[in-house]
Image (tube, rainbow, N blue to C red):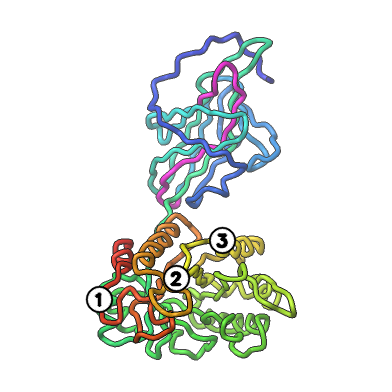
Amino acid sequence: MVYPKKFLVRTAIMATLTLIIVATFAPMFASAANPIIASLEAEKMSHTVGSRPVLVAGASNGSVLLMASKSTANGSIQLPALSNSIIVRAREDACKGNATMSVSIDGGLAITISTTSTAWANYTIAKSYLTGVHSLKLSFTNDYYLPGTCDRNLYIDRTVFTAPVIPAPLGINTCCGGSTEETRLLATGAKIIRTDRNDYEISFAHAHGIKVDGIIWLDDNSPGMASDIVELDNEPYFNNWDGLGGPAQWAVKARDVAKAVKAVYPTKPVLLPMLGYTNNGDVYVNGTWQPLVTVINQAAPDIWQYIDGVAIHPYTRPSAPNFTVMNHVRSELTALGAQANKPFWVTEIGWPTGGTDGSAVSEALQAQYLGQFIDTTRVRSDIAAVLVFKASDNTPSTSSEAYYGLYRNDGTQKPSFNVFLTRQF
């Protein structure tokens, strides 16, 4: 390498706290489950003799810090929120053993990481740090050089701090109102209710600390405008696009209504409905299947500035939860850039326990599938809320729509009730 070295025997590593570190091989940090809240490029840290910045294709900022001899890099970082893990992206030149680096925060006891590959890998340390400024010290501790044979070196790209994923609040759909329904809603512990009733249950909900997601059916004069969250429409793809002529015309109307909502309530979350459980999220337009995301963007490209979230109903009835279509829609939103990459609001999800249309599952499976779905959303950072469909079964009929409830029609609780209740936070 650039810096000449003496023939060194392996030196003893200074006393450190050694943790088991899991290396994840990844080109960048985009795959991290938890959101990144702060980062520090290694090549921008102050460093001692034995280290220097070098250009490397594929590095996060085009450069990395090469530690060719035992050396140290120091820097500081501002955390805007609680951090629950540190990820160091590094690689090595091995020589009679792996390179070892130590990581120390705020002058605390060093954590030793043994790199394991000449390929870039993310080394995660599960440790929490509070909001504020923190010092970061990275050291290469076990340089080794065997003339004519090998040279051990350490390369560090950057260090990131991640925040814990906050579990999406759980809500519930209600359609019927009345004191009986309200009593059942309170028993579930729901944080949000979703409704389109004339009074939108706003007074009731707010009296009990519950938020309201109101469906306004593309009507900017709807009393639902006073809800805490405004959902522009409900499944227009199954409602002939509200008679507007097609998805493009619907998108223009949705944009105009969203703009009107924001003019009156600039900070209120506005949700745009999106197809999320059939045809891969595509709709039939002019004889071809096209992504609804694309159709909306082409018809009303400025809609995203008035939208805060994407309302999606990722039903898989009667099968187990599956996020394939939802993930496909996410990739389409991401491809449009940050202006369209809004969080999902799962405003309906559930499994019916009756009906004759082939959608029904047993009450045991309803509970199992609901738990699986909620647990999966808890480790995703792109889901803002999950609202189960629905609180109570309706009058018995042949339609599966009558049997999605956490309560049976007679007021007794299905197993899914406890699944929902125990996953509140």
What span is colored magenta in the figure? 80-101
Query: Which residue lies under the disc numbered 3?
Result: 324
Which label's residue is closer to the chain start, 2 or 3? 3
Name the image quarter holding residue 187.
bottom left
State how far apart marks 3 and 1 are (Cα): 34 Å
Locate residue 199, reporting x and y percent.
Answer: 37, 89
Q: How many marks?
A: 3
Q: Quadrant of the N terminus?
A: top right
The amino acid marked with disc number 1 is Thr
In 3D space, how far apart are the residues under numbered discs 2 and 3 (Cα atoms)?
15 Å
The residue wearing badge 1 is 412
Q: Splitting the image into 4 quarters, where does residue 333 fall?
A: bottom right
Residue 121 position, x and y percent, is 57, 36
Query: From the viewer's perspective, is the residue at label 3 or at label 1 nearer?
Result: 1
Name the residue at 28% across, 81% down.
182
Q: Taking 375 as reference, is 54 left or right?
A: right
Q: Could you tell whether 300 is left or right of 89 in the image? A: right
Q: Residue type at mark 3?
A: Thr
Residue located 65% across and 75% down the image: 283
> Which mark identifies residue 349?
2
Assign the C terminus to one quadrant of the image: bottom left
Residue 320 drawn in magenta: no
Looking at marks 2 and 1 on the same chain, the residue that comes earlier in the sequence is marked by 2
In the rendering, at what x and y percent does residue 232 appear? 52, 81
User: What secondary structure is marked by label 3?
Assistant: helix
- CA gap, disc 2 to disc 1? 21 Å
